[in-house]
Image (cartoon, grey):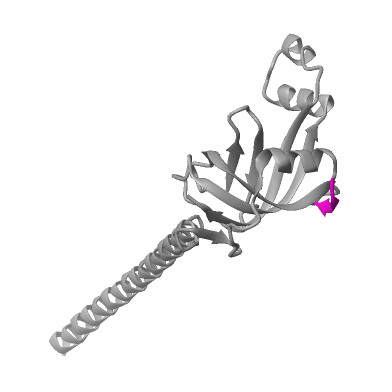
């Protein structure tokens, strides 16, 4: 009788140990599945970052046919840079142009023709036209379109709104202060800077 009781107790003890082992294995397995969940989240973040990178890369590429960029325009009616600057100075046919943030200027709707002297090398979002005697206009696309970065020396026609931009002495001194210039350097700033700019809607490469 005692022998039978001993065997029953031994079998019970073995069953209890086996149950605990199964329980422990289940817990470990559940933890492993949780780890897999984290891995899936990691993959999702990686895919998201990659998609964002591709989107930005595509956005910064020139969107044109190799000749036309932005709104499609023709080269006919392009005006020499010197003539455009004269019109802007005299506000000939000028209208109000809202540049945002309360900044309104007198602008002349025009097509300017000239040689590209400089282009934004990062994305082609701005360029400059210049003449041999030093006249210059800064052209911005406002990131509405991009031009090739290798068009320096090309003759282009740009359609848009040309205007005069004046940076006051106070503004220039403020910028110099932000740049960490000394008090002596800042004190030397006594004249405003006048620039001529054009907000472009389209560009065509003429030659």
Report which quarter residue 39 is drawn in. Answer: bottom left
Q: Quadrant of the N terminus?
A: bottom left
Give the image location of residue 152, x and y in percent: 48, 40
Q: Does any portion of residue 99 appear in the rendered image?
A: no
Compared across the picture, whether 45 is left or right of 31 comes to right
Compared across the picture, whether 158 is left or right of 121 comes to right
Q: Which residue sits furthest left?
A: 3
Q: Residue 49 magenta-drawn?
A: no
Residue 157 or 48: which is nearer the viewer?
157
Report which quarter residue 176 is drawn in. Answer: top right
* Residue in view at x 19 percent, y 84 percent: 11
Residue 105 or 116: which is nearer the viewer?
116
Give the image location of residue 174, x and y in percent: 78, 26
Residue 12 or 203: which is nearer the viewer?
203
In the image, the segment drawn in magenta is 92-99
Report which quarter residue 14 is drawn in. Answer: bottom left
* Residue in view at x 85 percent, y 40 percent: 90
Q: Residue 97 magenta-drawn?
A: yes
Compared across the picture, whether 66 is left or right of 8 comes to right
Q: Does any portion of residue 115 appear in the rendered image?
A: yes
Give the image location of residue 116, x and y in percent: 54, 41
* Residue in view at x 45 percent, y 59 percent: 66
Q: Is residue 95 above or below residue 122?
A: below
Compared across the picture, whether 90 is left or right of 134 comes to right
Give the image location of residue 8, x and y in percent: 20, 87
């Amino acid at each position: 009788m005692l022998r039978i009781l001993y065997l029953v107790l031994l079998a019970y003890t073995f069953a209890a140990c086996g149950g605990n082992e199964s329980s422990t294995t289940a817990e470990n397995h559940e933890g492993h599945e949780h780890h897999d969940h984290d891995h899936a989240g990691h993959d999702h973040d990686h895919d998201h970052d990659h998609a964002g990178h591709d989107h930005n890369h595509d956005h910064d590429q020139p969107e044109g046919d190799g000749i036309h960029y932005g709104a499609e325009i023709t080269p006919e009616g392009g005006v020499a840079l010197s003539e455009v600057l004269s019109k802007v100075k005299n506000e000939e046919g000028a209208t109000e142009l809202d540049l945002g943030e309360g900044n309104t200027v007198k602008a002349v709707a025009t097509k300017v023709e000239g040689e590209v002297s400089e282009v934004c090398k990062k994305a082609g979002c701005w360029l400059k036209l210049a003449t041999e005697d030093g006249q210059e206009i800064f052209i911005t696309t406002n990131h509405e379109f991009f031009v090739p970065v290798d068009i320096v020396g090309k003759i282009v026609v740009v359609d848009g709104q040309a205007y005069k931009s004046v940076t006051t002495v106070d503004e220039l001194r403020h910028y110099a202060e932000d740049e960490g210039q000394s008090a002596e350097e800042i004190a030397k700033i006594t004249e405003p800077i006048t620039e001529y700019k054009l907000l472009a809607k389209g560009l065509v490469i003429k030659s």
